[in-house]
Image: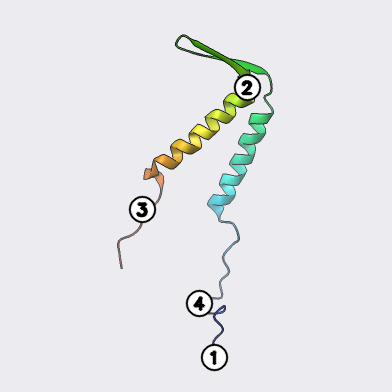
Amino acid sequence: MTDPQTTGSDEKKPAVSGKALTAIIIAIAALVFVFSNVEHATLRFLFLQFTMPAWGWFLAILIAGVVIGSLFPWFRPRKSSKK
């Protein structure tokens, strides 16, 4: 009788992949940068003017980048159609 947990190779997968670890490190660095800029900053766009803490602007740009990156999947690896 075989144990269902020991089937397959004995090779252990890392708990966190290299890509995930890189993303976590970049996210931590970005958040440290965001929250270390607490002075007020003014954004002028066309005829509008907005003033808020600089960390708010940086955080908004970071979130926009994450959303845009998730909307456009052409940088993701393609699945192979080989069977």
Q: Earlier in the sequence, mark 1 or mark 4?
A: 1
Residue type (three-letter) at the residue carrying disc 3: Arg
Q: Earlier in the sequence, mark 2 or mark 1?
A: 1
Q: Quadrant of the C terminus?
A: bottom left
Mark 4 in CB contact with mark 3 (< 8 angstroms): no
Q: Are there few (<14), some (14-19), or many (20+) residues within 10 Å of tag 2?
A: some
Q: Are there few (<14), some (14-19), or many (20+) residues within 10 Å of tag 1?
A: few
Nearer the observer: mark 2 or 4; the answer is 2
Quarter occupied by residue 51: top right
Q: Which residue is mark 2?
A: 54
Nearer the observer: mark 1 or 3; the answer is 1
Distance of label 1 from label 3 (alpha carbons): 39 Å
Give SS at disc 1. Answer: loop
Q: Which residue is mark 1?
A: 1
Residue at the (61%, 35%) spot, across then down: 30
Q: Percent position (x, y) of residue 76? A: 41, 48
Q: Which residue is mark 4?
A: 8
- Along the horizontal axis of the image, is 32 left or right of 4? right
Mark 2 in CB contact with mark 1 (< 8 angstroms): no
Mark 2 in CB contact with mark 4 (< 8 angstroms): no
Q: Percent position (x, y) of residue 16? A: 59, 57
Residue at the (57%, 47%) spot, across then down: 22
Give SS at disc 2. Answer: helix
Give SS at disc 4. Answer: loop
Q: Percent position (x, y) of residue 74? A: 36, 44
Q: Which residue is mark 3?
A: 78
Residue type (three-letter) at the residue carrying disc 4: Gly
- Along the horizontal axis of the image, is 35 left or right of 64? right
Residue at the (50%, 38%) spot, across then down: 66
- Along the horizontal axis of the image, is 78 left or right of 19? left
